[in-house]
Image (spheres, grey):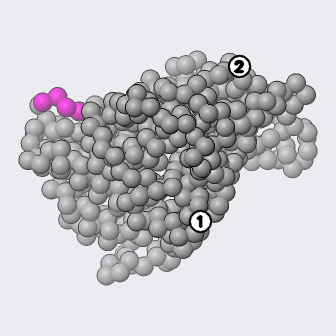
Amino acid sequence: MGNIVLVWAGGAGMSALAMIFHELDFKNLVCIDSTASQITETLQGHGIQVYVGNHPYVVKPEDYVIYSEACKDSPEIKLSRSYTEEKIYPYHYALNYFQFIWEISKHFFTVAVAGTNWKSSTTSLLIQVLSSLSPRFWVWIVWALVPDFWNVNYKLGHKDAVKSIFEKIVTWKITHFDHSLLKKYFFVIESCEYKRHFLNMDVDYSMIANVELDHTDYYKDDADYQDAFNEFFDRTRYEVFLRKWEKSVDFLRTRKSEKTCDIENSYFDFQHLLWDFNQANASLVQWMAEHVLEFERSGIAIRGDDSSLLTITDIDRSQIKNLIEQFRGIWRRLEKLVDDGKRAIVYSDYGHHPSSLEVVFDAVKKKYPEKKIVAVFQPHQAKRVLEFWHPFSEVLKKFDQTMIYSIYTARENLQELLADVQVEAVDTSAVQTVSDLGNLFAQSGGAVYTEQVADVLELIEKSTQTEVIVIFTAGDLDRLVRGSL
């Protein structure tokens, strides 16, 4: 076997795989990305070989390649596919991230956290609790850096067993594999619905936070989006946990009630989290943690029949509640960047859907009722801007001041989008470029438009203690601002 090559390793999920391979002491690890970032720098800081931009590494036939969907047409992946098509080497594999996750999930008892919003926060909170209470959890992957995990986005245990499984996956050598390891340990994973990727998993239990139409560059409408979650529901082997108050998942409740478990809200005195909706997310986590502890104690397969489980003690429940309340949040999810008492308090958030912007505004306003709330919003994809133009405008009007930063586009042809998506009561006929679209979007909402990070930094520097600034970005703005601050 040659090297294990991770292409687009700067992505959140891909970087977690890189760190897992590194911690398992795979010496033949190579990481590739088109641009430098905080994540690639972190990988290099751990001694991992990382190639950035125009690099000299050439993928070899004997390499095992894992790649992000974002770079499926990159030179490295095209070359890798040619090896497979020409059958140059019998064990050459090129799997995308989700296909590799499927390979992992087949070997472990898999708990998947899905939904339009709040996947990363809920997954991280679940990992924080379970890793502290149960010895059977060995691998978790979340798409954000987590302070409580020493600012990485994965956790790992039972390394000898894990390495044996990973060696089996990447070499296909099963002669000496211990089959008693299959489904012995737990795997917790944040699951993305984009292009139905979350269907590429062997899921035992799932948790679904909410379901609102998103990824409109792929999904045709609400029915198409819900159909994907319906299939995810069907593929979950045992139970699907839902937040009881969340109306957006009613379509799941009506289908197979014996597989659905509605979770009542509990109250948590969070020490670090602002969001009210985290009460519901934490309630999901609390119930799942209690369910798992019963399983650990009883030694039986997890199923929905609670009558066969032992009773959790008040001590266990108290431990779970304390772990939840002490959780410090995660990277770019209402993460506080500045609070120096001299200027505005500055938060960074990954919000890129109207509902996620709204819940952040409500949380910040509740925390700082007397302060002026300012939004700096970098939209993620032109298609989202067009599809959710009016919902975005309504939410952004709640803020006292709004700045729109250059739209972060990916996988898009603007002229095709403009021909396909018509925004009610908005004339986009003069739009020729992404900059035109950003300007028009800002003007329609009474916002200021900029493509200069210096304008964002100036806004922060000239701010006062009477303000809170929330920077919403799913693109490059967070890295630029964070580096300058």
User: Which residue is farthest bottom?
Assistant: 425
Q: Nearer the viewer, mark 1 or mark 2?
A: 1
Q: Which residue is mark 2?
A: 160
**Figure quadrant of residue 28:** top right
Q: Is residue 338 magenta?
A: yes
- Above/below status of 17 relative to 477: above
- Above/below status of 458 relative to 41: below
Visible residue check, residue 309: yes
Instruction: In the rendered structure, find residue 158 and report the number of the disc placed on it.
Output: none
**Observer-nearest of 175 and 476:** 175
Visible residue check, residue 142: no
**Residue at image point 50% right, 32% down:** 130
**Residue at image point 62% right, 47% down:** 303
Q: Which residues are magenta?
A: 336-341
Residue type at mark 2 is Asp
Q: How far from the left and from the top, in percent, is residue 49?
A: 63, 23
Give the Cα distance between marks 1 and 2: 39 Å
Q: Which residue is mark 1?
A: 256
Residue type at mark 1 is Lys
